[in-house]
Image (cartoon, rainbow, N blue to C red):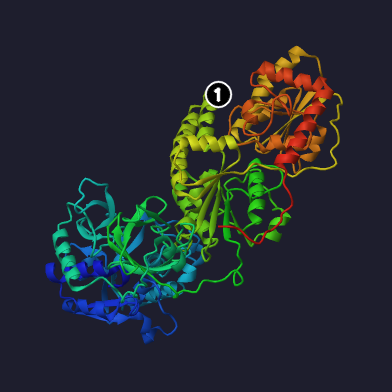
Amino acid sequence: MAIGGRHVAGGWATLSILRQVHHCRLPIEIWHLGDRDLPPSVRSLFDEFDVEFVDASHDRRLAQFRPTTGWELKSVAISLSRFAEVIYLDADNVPLVDPGSLFDDPRYRSTGALFWPDIRNANRFNPIWSITGTTAPEGPEFESGLIVVDKLRHWPELQLTMHFNEHSHFYYRYLLGDKDTFQLAWTRLNGRFALPRKLPEQVFGTHFGNSSGPLALIGVWQHDFNGARITLHHTDTPLVAWGRNPTHPEFKLSGHRDVALAELRRRWDGYFEAPPKPKLNSNLPAEIESIRWYRYIIQGIECRDLEFLTDGHIGSGALRAERFWRLDGSDADRRLIISSREHDTCELRMRDDGSWVGQWTQFQQSPVELIPLAGLHHDATEAEIDPRPKLLYVTPVAPAELGNGLAMRAANVLRLLLETHRVTVLVIPLYHRGAATTLPTWMEAFCEDIRTAQPPMTYTRENVPDRDVEQWERAWIEEIGRAYDDQSFDVIHIFRMFTLKYAQRYLDSATNQPATLQLDLDDVESRTQQRLARLYSRHRLDAGRTEALRMATWAEVTERQLMNSWDRVFVCSAEDKVELDARVPTHRAEIVVLPNRVMLPVDLPPPPRGTPLTLLCVGTLSYFPNADGVIWFCREVLPVIRELSAVQLRLLVVGTGATDEVRDLAHIPEVEIVGEVERVDEWYQQADLVIVPLRAGGGTRIKLIEAMAYQRPIVSTSIAAEGLAVTDGIHLLIGDRPVVFARHCLRLLQDASLANKLAANGRKLVEERYALREIEVKATLAR
């Protein structure tokens, strides 16, 4: 067994049940990582269990490899223990029977190794199989809370497992800790083993004294080869000596567990080391701002040093539960609240000696102390570090100056971030159609690093069989997490809400917990999806409507969560900001309007005014509202134009991803489906008029801004123009009904003076409000 840190209470309870309930008399070794992990004063508590302690941090047999985590320690403990046959048991894996009987199991006698299954199957898309020249096994991954192995029969496999853990800095990028190293070693060397067929069952329970409260995920039941429960592994809620432990009505040993933990509390004060002596000071706000560093002690679990920043964030040392601080209450009853992004974590009150004491308000409700560490930490000066925050920019499309509107937005925002941050870019190619093949040259010049996380194997999501989608997507998410797994960031900026799940590894990383979180929504996704649902209904596409409604519900829930937990949310228009404010009136996140912008083209030729007159429609045609707009114009507006006038005209449709229905429009004499082009400027030069016939969507249309930048007259729908500072009759003409849209087109085609006036006004508006400037990298940024 490995015991240390937060697993002392679990180890004590498990050993108590082994010795006193199951009367297990097997010799026991307890492995740990030195006095900081398990001090002598704590080790002495375990003397009554007749155990031997082994300190892996000073073991001479490990001259080339010193494990630094409990995951790495597991393979070391099994391989270097004095036993020839080993039962390894996690400290938080409570046995329901005497595990010694496993040595007599005929499957163990036959194979020399017993493992237990995990909840999920081995992922055949994981690159580790090709890296190690191994074929992915069928069936579940291993779960290493319980292992039985004959070392004499499986010494090669154990040595290979040791190799994987010795080089964990590489292999853990592909594996979920030690558990996968055992399965990989046994698979690579064709080692024999037995695995129970019954998969683990998740265990949910309630906290003591709160039977009506929400269920907490405790861990999993594991089973023997006959399907009977053999252990309760506390994988999700570790046992604590001080505080509440969740229990399940079918866990018959909960009474023995609680008696054992009560005995541990009687013998141990919960400190791993003597706490520092606090500095006496009762000036509350000034105290936090001037001292800045505090020793954070969760009784019986751990202690860490936290950096309290003046803006209410918690910096270095913070984990998910400790991201913000605030002072509440009156001077007579001042409380210090530490919170996560989702909820308050603990509440503390100041003592006379200047320290703070309280308890967690969530989970186990363990006692907490906060002790000032004035003068014990050195704060780097601005002269010693680059003052600009380090930012990770995660985008679902390669940024581009021209072409796809999503890619142009990605580039626009990146330009602004580069002025005030040291930016590292991670491209997740969720949208490969129409995406840029080369990045803008300024990205190489100004970004610290640029990486693309390609999907696993060579095919895209559309080519993955349905049965493999979940594994394929999980492998891609893990590949994304490997791109910058050795770095930490001050700010994480995610572009578009649907990118969130792919970047989750960076959001969950312990080193990124103090990071400021920014999300560029671009538009209000829930509203956009509701509009899409109505558009699908018009086309009688029930499957599309159902999916859009599902996405709208998901987006609305997610928007509320993000508005109450993230630091900053970007939208592209003031209208979107008003919409979000109305949907979530009391929100934590700052809402920032970041308009879409375009590069201003130069040397603009006037519209050709030739015969036939040319209409231009530009957009990504795989996006349903764009395809619908083209179809609507061709089928409902174009016939009206023919009926009202004999003017000769042609329509050029430019954009990538044309659907079959859009391509079929080419049979109309006036319509030419140009498709994907490398540059759009030559097509704008041919245009007498630009149409933007959108009937759904959100945010602001970059294509409309682009058309104004090229100084072309425009007819659009009201949805296409919303969010922009345009006025009907001043910058463009707006029409939503086919007859109105058709009359506007004819008016601008026939009245060159009006068309030129609108085009000039549009160009001037872009110059004033929507033009990109050259990048100017600044040296400072207020957090």
Residue 681 position within the rendered picture, expressed as x and y whole percent measured from the top left? 79, 40
Give the residue drawn at x 28%, y 82%: 82
Which picture quadrant has residue 339? bottom left
Residue farthest to the bottom, as pictured: 60
Residue 43 position within the rendered picture, expressed as x and y whole percent measured from the top left? 25, 78
Q: Is 604 displayed left or right of 159 in the figure?
A: right
Residue 199 position within the rendered picture, expressed as x and y whole percent measured from the top left? 29, 54
On the question of residue 145 being in view, the answer is yes
Residue position for label 1:
539
Viewer-proximal residue among 106 and 403? 403
Give the residue drawn at x 63%, y 60%: 780
Badge 1 marks a residue whose secondary structure is loop
Which picture quadrant has residue 166? bottom left
Task: Name which residue type carries label 1.
Answer: His
Viewer-proximal residue among 306 and 747? 306
Q: Is 537 displayed left or right of 700 in the figure?
A: left
